[in-house]
Image (cartoon, rainbow, N blue to C red):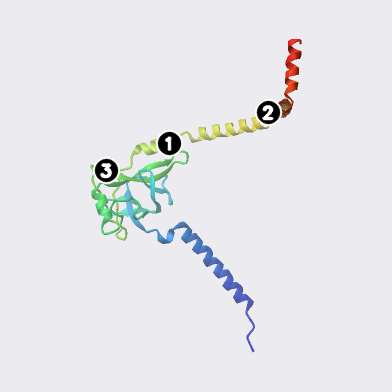
Amino acid sequence: MSKKVNKTAIGLFVIGGLILLMVGIVVFGSGLLFKRTIKFVLYFDGSVKGLSIGAPVMFRGVSIGAVKDISLIYDSKTGTIMLPVIVEIEQGRIKGAPSFGDFGGDKKMIELGLRGKLEIYSFLTSQLMISFDFYPDKPVKLRGILKQYPELPTLPISPDIFELMNEIPIKEIAKNLEATVKGLDKLVNSSDLQRSLYDLRDTLQETKQTMRSVGLLTEYLEQHPEALLKGKSIIKGE
């Protein structure tokens, strides 16, 4: 005698299969399975206000990765606070250049002048990003605190960044935006605009009827040219 099929087990099996299918579609569709990434650590002196996890990592305006973690480390030797920032960079993103993390490729990039610095990503939200470029004339300063990640050098934070962020009139922009929205709402819902739209609709309908009449008249004259000749004679008084 065959055993009865466990409907609960079958249901769980089907649900599990659907979940695996959805995960596979997401992974393969996004290309995450074939994308090689490597994590690096960068150190910034001073405040990193405006830099958050998930912030973009750019090279000359092109995205090459994202910020994965930001932490604080106290250096007892110098009595200062270090701000290690962990970034994840896609390998082979810069075509033709030594690949990050492959056989010391990052060291070759550092020798070429690769440096990271903080830049403003959004003036409206005061969000920062990490921007890389080549600065061969700038000295290399490595801290060597977190040994589990290869380190990339950075440039000192420019105080102009925070001055610019503080000078952005966020409240005034918000007030102007609110006033603009109210003005548009008032315009759209005004009786004058509604009346003008009705008048425009009537004018378009009249124009459409007139064009239709002209079309019918033209078609009639093409089929009865004698009517056109008769009309000319009337105009001349013949």
Residue in the foreground of this view, choosing between 167 and 27 = 27
**Is residue 11 depicted above or below 183 in this figure?**
below
Residue bearing mark 2: 193
Residue in the foreground of this view, choosing between 21 and 214 = 214
How far is mark 2 from mark 3, CA to CA? 58 Å
Residue 218 placement: quadrant? top right
How far is mark 1 from mark 2, CA to CA? 41 Å
Residue 10 placement: quadrant? bottom right
Q: Can residue 48 be seen in this view?
A: no
Disc 3 packing (10 Å; few <14; some 14–19; many ≥20): some
Residue in the foreground of this view, choosing between 167 and 103 = 103
Location of the N terminus (image quadrant): bottom right
Q: Can residue 132 be seen in this view?
A: yes
Disc 2 packing (10 Å; few <14; some 14–19; many ≥20): few
Q: Residue 196, how many percent across, how many down? A: 69, 26
Residue bearing mark 1: 166
Q: Residue 228, how many percent across, how many down? A: 73, 20
Amino acid type, residue under disc 2 in the picture: Leu
At horizontal 37% and vertical 38% (from top left) the residue drawn is 161
Q: Residue 124, how many percent across, how many down? A: 47, 39
Left or right: residue 142 compared with residue 204: left
Among the two numbered marks 1 and 3 on one chain, the one whose residue lies closer to the N terminus: 3
Residue bearing mark 3: 135
How far is mark 1 from mark 3, CA to CA? 28 Å
At horizontal 73% and vertical 11% (from top left) the residue drawn is 236
